[in-house]
Amino acid sequence: MGRQSDIGLVLSGGGARAAYQVGVLLGISRLLPDARVNPFPIICGTSAGAINAVALASGAGNFHLAVSTLAQMWKQLHIQDVYDASSGYFLKTFLHFGLSVMSGGRLWRNPKSFLDNAPLRELLTKVMVFEGIDHSVRHGALKALALTASCYTTGMSVTFFQGADSLEEWERYQRLGMRERIGIEHMMATSAIPLIFPSVCIGEKFYCDGAVRQLSPLSPALHLGAEKLFVVGLASKRPDTIERRHSGFYPSPAQIFGHLLNSVFIDSMSVDMERLTRVNHTVSLLQSHEELARQTQLRRVDIFMLNPSKSLEGIAYKHTRLFPPLLRFLMKGTGATRHRGTALATYLLFEPGYTRELIALGYKDALHQKEAIRRFLEL
């Protein structure tokens, strides 16, 4: 048997949708000959996917235990563990926005965000074992961990990575890779959805969610040496005919904002997937022309992508009642509790009823493709 390929795991962002990724990882752990062995030496995460990435990397010495612990966290997660949804907070925030707008920012400076994710910072500080990343690298269970954030100050997409000494930093158009010791600030930065959550300062520069301006979400794993890519996406299966039947209605605020979030978190991944497919096709054509093949740096990269097999909007619609009373009232007012506006709810509904259903879906989807996954992971 030859050397096993270095497989990169790419976990995209998507707020509460990232619970689906945990289900997929649970399914994969069941397929492994030895569930303790981490099949992904290179792990890359963006936004909420970065939370899953750090948990896996810090516990890479025992893959099954790391995934199981992560699943328990998601299954017990509530909105108040991620952001402040109390009536007092919203009343204060509305007053803040009102005074700021009416006074032109003179009486009170503009708020940093619509929501306060201080509870998430507190939770991650408690549950994440950042020292485990170094431990995993030293013991050969991990080659690299990478988190991507978008820099307001420079306009660059920045990938912070921690891993083997042989890995080098890189710089390309509008993106760069920086070696740093991953910590809580990097996790908060990559998950700071613009306007919704406050930006984060790292090294005197301000950062927001890594999915913003991430032109090539697959490239960090390749820069870090991945020879194959396993991508767990969060692109929801297209809604049913209800969407088309009501297409004449003017879009609600929730539908518009959900559309924007989908374009940030999903579209760049789809475009990069198409680009890689074209590169693979070009490389295959060059294989019969040795001289031409030697003149290019292009190489074939096998890729396996798994997306939810069901509409996440449909699942969220069943659970919108789980939003706290005032937030549910606000979501209803923006149209986020109606079929056409539930895309926004799929990102913000951090409640067990919803996340557990996503975990179950991810687990089912992984086992449904178990033979293909086994072949890809060279098991």
Image (cartoon, helix red, strand yellow):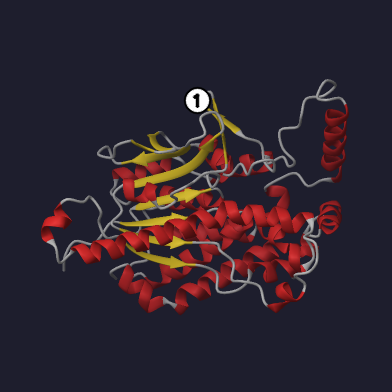
Q: Which residue lies furthest to the top in this view?
A: 106
Which percent across, then down, holds residue 47? Answer: 55, 48
Residue sitting at the far left: 291
Quarter of the image with the N terminus in it: bottom left
55 and 14: which is toward the camera? 14
Which residue is more in the foreground, 144 or 287? 287
Residue 80 in view of the camera: yes
**x, y (%) of residue 223?**
32, 46
For residue 354, what is the image quadrant? bottom right
Q: Residue at x 27, y 37 (%)?
A: 165
Indicate the quadrant where residue 109 lies.
top right
**Residue at 75% over, 66% down:** 340
10 Å crowding of disc 1: few (<14), some (14-19), many (20+): few
Q: Is residue 103 above or below residue 74?
A: above
Closest to the observer, 107 or 10 = 107
Residue 270 x/y as whole percent? 48, 60
Indicate the amino acid at tag 1. Gly
**Which quarter of the figure is the C terminus placed in?**
bottom left
Q: Which of 123 and 45 is in front in this view?
A: 45
Q: Mark 1 points at which residue?
A: 203
Tell me what residue is drawn at x 59 percent, y 54 percent: 263
- Position of 233 with respect to 276 (left or right) is right
Whole-percent x and y of residue 273?
42, 60
